[in-house]
């Protein structure tokens, strides 16, 4: 499949309906994904990005049906991560001298991955590449989300090729934002932002303000994953500005794991306390051993506060809780509150350990948390309900 977006600008990527895990096993892709590659034909022809390695042959074969490969004059690598550069080695076997336009960092990374001395042309913000009647303007976007990341803009057609930015892991035969289910689309967009871009939020704001400052008209945003934004394309840019600004809703997420249901019962009693103190608040509970971690992270991103619970086991906490805490710590959430809870039998250091991890992750900790011995009885459950009420009052 390939299709024309506008005046000899073609989508030549790959829809991956089967993908369920991305970044190894790190990111769940319940709805598959796409690897978007674009071909721009003018007096000169440019290819913007390729596809993931397993689809190299399919990509190169299909590309050669659209255009003789030796008629590709330029290759632009907006980002060197293998989901976009993976087909380069096979493509370059066919056209080894074709110049590759990329940032200095991308050159280093491509050499690190593929160990080839291709014909690299280093570009930086403001550099231009004439294709004839139109030109590509480059904008480097370091750490959005890798050091090499770059956007490019096609004059005349007002198309921003933004690579990962504004993308989402979402396979659809309807490759435009106005043709897909909006709830599904935005859920995948916010999941992508929460799990990948959260730590770079300050840079997101700065880069968007810089690009807006160029005052370039934008009719299309062609990302490297998911749909092309053509209906009000700036709506996703506005969403990014909102998400980058310590985003939160009136929502609390409770994450726990439990050995004999004691910590689960504590979690439910705490949720009851929260709801009785604030009827409008959204409270969601996730057993971290049974839930998708990226979905949990998305809920944390939306929340103004979280509560994390674990039974104490040995001298520590349950491994699924330790795992999600490590994910949360690495994402450097800002402006959120937290506290810990858990059941124990004798030493009971789990709650303290969770609070320390949360503090390390940048959360503002409320109180010392709550721990209950063995299986909570009626009085212990009441203490958990009160804990939930007080937690909300202290936000
Ligand atoms: Fe879609 Fe950073 O690769």
Image (cartoon, rainbow, N blue to C red):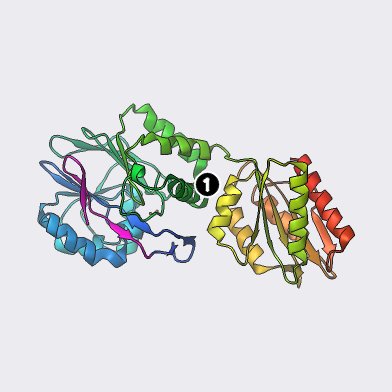
Q: Is residue 114 visible?
A: yes
| Disc 1: residue Cβ within 8 A of ligand 1's nearest atom | no
For the point 81% across and 67% down, the residue is 344
Q: In the rendering, at what x and y percent does residue 286 appear?
A: 64, 59
* Residue found at the far right of this picture: 379
Q: Provide the residue designation for mark 1.
A: 198
In x, y percent, where is residue 342? 77, 61
As drawn, is 238 to the left or to the right of 284?
left
Secondary structure beneath dot 1 equals helix
Residue 161 picture quarter: top left
- Check the image and report above or below for 389 versus 212: below
Q: In x, y percent, where is residue 246?
A: 58, 39
Query: Magenta segment range?
Result: 1-18
**Residue 266 percent coordinates (x, y):** 77, 59
In which quadrant of the rendered image does the N terminus lie?
bottom left
Q: How many marks?
A: 1
Task: Count neighbours of disc 1 (C-alpha within 10 A) and say few if under 14, some if 14 to 19, many if 20 or more.
Answer: many
Instruction: For ligand 1, give the image quadrant.
Output: bottom left
């Amino acid at each position: 499949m390939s299709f024309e977006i506008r005046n000899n600008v073609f989508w030549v990527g790959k829809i991956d309906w089967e993908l369920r895990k991305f970044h190894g096993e790190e990111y769940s892709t319940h709805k598959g994904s796409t690897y978007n590659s674009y071909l721009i034909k003018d007096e000169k022809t440019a290819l913007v990005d390729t596809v993931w390695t397993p689809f190299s042959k399919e990509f190169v074969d299909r590309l050669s049906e659209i255009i003789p490969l030796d008629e590709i004059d330029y290759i632009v690598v907006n980002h060197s991560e293998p989901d976009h550069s993976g087909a380069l080695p096979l493509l370059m076997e066919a056209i080894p001298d074709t110049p590759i336009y990329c940032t200095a960092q991308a050159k280093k990374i491509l050499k690190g991955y593929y160990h080839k001395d291709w014909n690299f042309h280093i570009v930086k913000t403001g550099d231009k590449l004439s294709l004839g009647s139109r030109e590509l303007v480059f904008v480097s976007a370091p750490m959005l989300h890798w050091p090499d990341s770059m956007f490019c803009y096609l004059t005349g057609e007002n198309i921003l090729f933004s690579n990962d930015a504004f993308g989402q892991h979402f396979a659809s035969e309807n490759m435009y934002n106005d043709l897909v289910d909006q709830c599904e689309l935005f859920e995948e967009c916010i999941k992508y932002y929460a799990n990948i871009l959260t730590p770079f939020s300050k840079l997101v704001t700065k880069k968007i303000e810089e690009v807006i400052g160029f005052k370039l008209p934008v009719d299309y945003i062609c990302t490297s994953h998911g749909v092309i934004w053509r209906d009000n394309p700036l709506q996703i840019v506005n969403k990014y500005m909102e998400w980058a600004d310590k985003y939160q809703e009136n929502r609390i997420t409770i994450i726990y794991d439990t050995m004999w249901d004691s910590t689960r019962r504590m979690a439910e009693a705490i949720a009851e306390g929260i709801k009785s103190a604030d009827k409008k608040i959204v409270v969601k509970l996730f057993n971290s051993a049974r839930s998708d971690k990226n979905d949990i992270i998305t809920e944390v991103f939306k929340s103004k506060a979280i509560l994390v619970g674990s039974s104490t086991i040995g001298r520590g906490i349950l491994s699924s809780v330790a795992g999600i805490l490590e994910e949360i710590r690495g994402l450097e959430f800002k402006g959120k509150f937290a506290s810990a809870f858990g059941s124990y039998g004798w030493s009971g250091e789990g709650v303290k350990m969770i609070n320390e991890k949360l503090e390390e992750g940048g959360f503002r900790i409320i109180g010392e948390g709550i721990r209950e011995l063995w299986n909570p009885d009626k009085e212990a459950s009441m203490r958990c309900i009160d804990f939930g009420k007080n937690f909300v009052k202290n936000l």
